[in-house]
Image (spheres, rainbow, N blue to C red):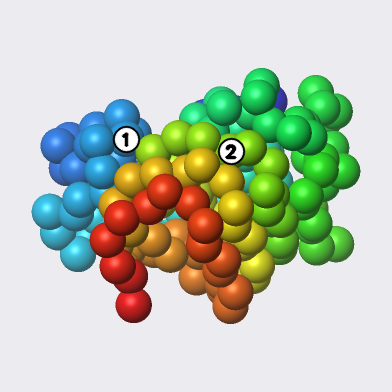
Amino acid sequence: DFDVADLSKSQCLCDFYTYTANVLNYGIEFESDKCLQALQGRVYTPAFEKFELERFYLETGGDHWRIGWADDDNHCEWFGLACNANGFITKINLRNNNLTGIGSIYRLELPELTTLDLAENKLSGTVYSGVTLFLQKLVHIDISNNEFSGHAD
């Protein structure tokens, strides 16, 4: 399970408004560069990533996916995921798997992720350029054939 101790203490550098906006999913807004640096300096662990994936599963209607995720402790063995030797997620391929929800991909924090394929689902919301803020190693993203609006460069 996710342990609060897995989070970096640098998160506390964020002002209260920004931190609560991020945690409560009211959008990612930064009132200062220090807050952005603190969040980017967070210490990530496989346990934190598993927590992120469990949240993503719930936010995208995981109980109604065509192929869901088991309660297995090893998230690297879940459908559509691939991990590196250290247990960090490197690929997500959930194409045409009946994902639903609004804006779930904007909150994914998976710093080793290189490939994200969520095409041909029912995801919605506004696409904006910050979609990859916490996906710094991402080289391929496919979110086509969903119900998004907007434009991201």
Camera-side residue: 19 or 149?
149
Q: Are marks 2 and 1 in contact (CB under 8 Å)?
A: no
- The residue at the point 85 percent across, 62 percent down is 85
Pick the front one: 4 or 1: 1
The label number, if any, that marks residue 25 in the structure image: 1
Image coordinates of residue 67 in percent, x first then y, are 78, 35
Q: Is residue 31 left or right of residue 87?
A: left
Q: Is residue 23 visible?
A: yes
Residue 18 location, quadrant:
top left
Between residues 36 and 127, which one lies in front from this camera angle? 127
Q: Could you say where residue 151 lies in the image, as x and y percent from the top left? A: 30, 67
Q: On screen, 139 above or below 150?
A: below
The amino acid on which the numbered mark 2 sits, given as a three-letter code, is Leu
Q: Is residue 101 left or right of residue 90?
A: left
The residue sitting at 56% across, 66% down in the picture is 142
Give the alpha-carbon distance from disc 2 to disc 1, as whole Å. Answer: 19 Å
Occupied quadrant, residue 129: bottom left
Q: Secondary structure at mark 2?
A: loop
Locate the C terminus by quadrant. bottom left
Question: How far from the left and from the top, in percent, is residue 36?
Answer: 28, 60
Residue at label 2?
Answer: 99
Task: Indicate the position of residue 24 as horizontal and vertical percent values.
Answer: 31, 29
Q: Which residue is at a point 42% across and 48% down the rendered structure image?
A: 147
Q: Of callouts 2 and 1, which one flags the residue occurring earlier in the amino acid sequence? A: 1
Q: Secondary structure at mark 1?
A: loop
Q: Nearer the viewer, residue 13 or 24?
A: 24
Dot 1: within a 10 Å radius of its alpha carbon, few (fewer than 14), some, or many (20 or more) residues?
A: few
Look at label 1 and name its amino acid.
Asn
